[in-house]
Amino acid sequence: QCNLVVLPQGKESFDFLLFCQRNKKACPLIEVCDVGSPHPYGVAKDADLRTDVPKYAIYRDGELVEEVTDATPYWPENSVAFLIGCSFSYDGELMGAGIPLRSAEQGKNVPMYRTNIECRSAGCLKGNMVV
């Protein structure tokens, strides 16, 4: 499982790429798509990131404005799509090994904690590690 981040080509996408490269534990980079492309050829060549994700959260200026099941009308031509790793990838493996997860048993999101471990900044992006 991955998280999808779509940013305009330019400073924002460069800063995000640099942040991921500098902070591999915080933002493990799985794939970077070509500009304007919704196809992650390196990991899923037949996938379309505009339609193959169950739900998309659309943010503008840092605020959630809408949730949709098809992001095609929102996909900017000058965008760069990033797939980053997600802790949910481990849940199935842990439960498959017989390790119970209270959050899964209770139908809740995984617990997350803000640490005092600083990530290395990149442009306007900075913050502490979340585990």
Image (cartoon, grey):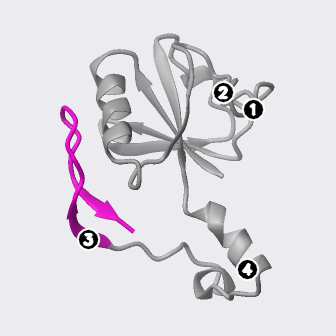
Q: Circle 4 is placed at which residue position?
A: 95
Q: Circle 2 is placed at which residue position?
A: 40
Q: Earlier in the sequence, mark 2 or mark 3?
A: 2
Residue 73 placement (x, y as % from top left):
60, 21
Kindly indicate whether the residue at mark 1 contacts the one at mark 3 (C-beta within 8 angstroms).
no
Which secondary structure lies at badge 1?
A: loop
Q: Circle 1 is placed at which residue position?
A: 44
As for residue 25 lying within the magenta part, the answer is no
Q: Is residue 87 above or below residue 24?
A: below
For the point 68% across and 40% down, which residue is it?
Answer: 69
Kindly indicate whether the residue at mark 1 contacts the one at mark 4 (C-beta within 8 angstroms).
no
**Residues under labels 4 and 1: Cα distance?**
25 Å
Local crowd size for mark 3, using a 10 Å CA cut-off: few (<14), some (14–19), many (≥20): few
**Residues under labels 3 and 4: Cα distance?**
26 Å
Kindly indicate whether the residue at mark 3 contacts the one at mark 2 (C-beta within 8 angstroms).
no
Q: Earlier in the sequence, mark 3 or mark 1?
A: 1
Residue 121 placement (x, y as % from top left):
20, 42
For the point 68% across and 86% down, which residue is it?
Answer: 105
The segment highlighted magenta reads 114-131
Q: Circle 3 is placed at which residue position?
A: 115
**Residues under labels 2 and 1: Cα distance?**
6 Å
Which secondary structure lies at badge 3?
A: strand
Local crowd size for mark 4, using a 10 Å CA cut-off: few (<14), some (14–19), many (≥20): few
